Amino acid sequence: MNPITLLIIYFTIFMGPMITMLSSNLFIMWIGLEMNLLALIPLMINNSNPRSTEAATKYFLTQATASMILLLSIIMNFKQLGLWTFQSETNNLIMTMTFISLAIKLGLAPFHSWLPEVTQGIKLKVGLILLTWQKVAPLSIMSQFHELMNPKMLILSAMISVLIGAWNGLNQTQVRKIMAYSSIAHMGWMVSILSYNPSLTLLNFLIYILMTIPMFMIFHAHSFTSITSMSLMWNKMPMALPMISLILLSTGGLPPLTGFLPKWAIITELLKNNNPILATLMAMAALINLFFYTRLIYSTSLTTFPTNNNSKMYIHHNHTKTNNILAPLMILSTSMLPLSPLLL
């Protein structure tokens, strides 16, 4: 792709959520979401093949439907109140429609089915943008108007997301699908606490991004797309084995790693607000999540799959790919737990 075109696309992807976050006018927020949606599609179909075209079509149709529902709720709100913002007088139906549209955009259950399919059909780089930066705009709108949304609806969606993200990730062999289901589960954790403590949602989101970026960087550098291809890591990049194992355990929420911090804080907050059932269910689902991360660690670090003799020679090749940002990200994604008094 032309470098100038690429620059314009990345600038639009960056500016979309910024416009949404900095605006107080619902219509301008909607424009920010649309910029984000339309700029990502050229990246998805950059190396055109049937898989990426299908993923881009699915992405466009689901996101366009969500945008249409959101625009309808904004217009209905303007017709009711004459304002381009939601107020406490806003009709419950309008707020429910807004929540549904934002849930589709975030990939929250029960509107999650598009996310694993789209992530599987696109390149790892674009998958990283889809699972991190694309969530910023809808999450900012949801956290801005969470007080007007029905808390029972938020909690129900969060519970289903956490369970579906854990359960469906179990039988996956493709790395991108595993990361997509992991994203659905993490979104569930974020939304579960939104009505009680929105700052914890922000903390969880930032830590989720910190853990996802180094993982995708390792996958992208060595073209790991399935568990089978990851089983050759011992030989392509032995130093990455402890790194990826720690990041995966951190993403699963195992103490004393960074990923334990948001889970610990969220469960504590739910118990403070007399919600032990949700806290117990989410803790149990986190164990299922940890199981499929551990399965990835087992196939990469703890066992040697049957391979031909040629593949054992990779280790002797010179590796030209160097990454200076991976080390600090690795430290942040695994050893921030001692900073918890400062962050909380």
Image: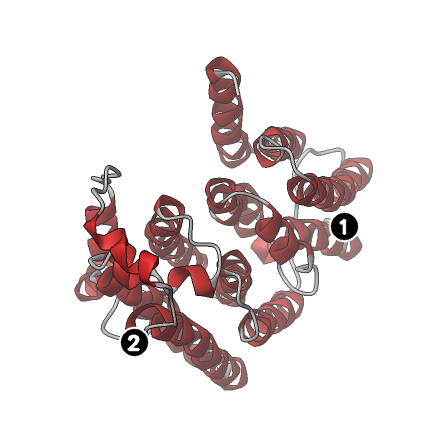
Residue 200 lies left or right of residue 79; in this view the side is left
> Percent from the top left, x then y, of residue 132?
47, 47
Give me the residue at 23% from left, 42% from top.
319
Image coords of residue 260 (percent x, y): 32, 70
Judge whether 212 appears above or below 75 on screen.
below
How has the structure been colored for display?
A: secondary structure
Which tag, 1 or 2, sits closer to the chain's start?
1
Q: Could you tell me which secondary element the residue under label 2 belongs to?
A: helix
Q: Which residue is mark 2?
A: 302
Q: Nearer the viewer, residue 319 or 157?
A: 319
Name the residue carrying label 1. Answer: 94
| Crowding near the residue tagged with mark 1, few <14, some 14–19, many ≥20 C-alpha atoms within 10 Å | many
Q: Quadrant of the C terminus?
A: bottom left
The amino acid beneath tag 2 is Leu
Foreground pick, 7 / 243: 243
Give x and y (percent) for residue 94: 76, 50
Residues marked 1 and 2 touching at CB (< 8 Å): no
The kind of residue on which mark 1 rests is Ile
Question: Is 193 placed above or below 43 here?
Answer: below
Q: Looking at the image, which residue is at 19% across and 61% down?
A: 339
SS at badge 1: helix
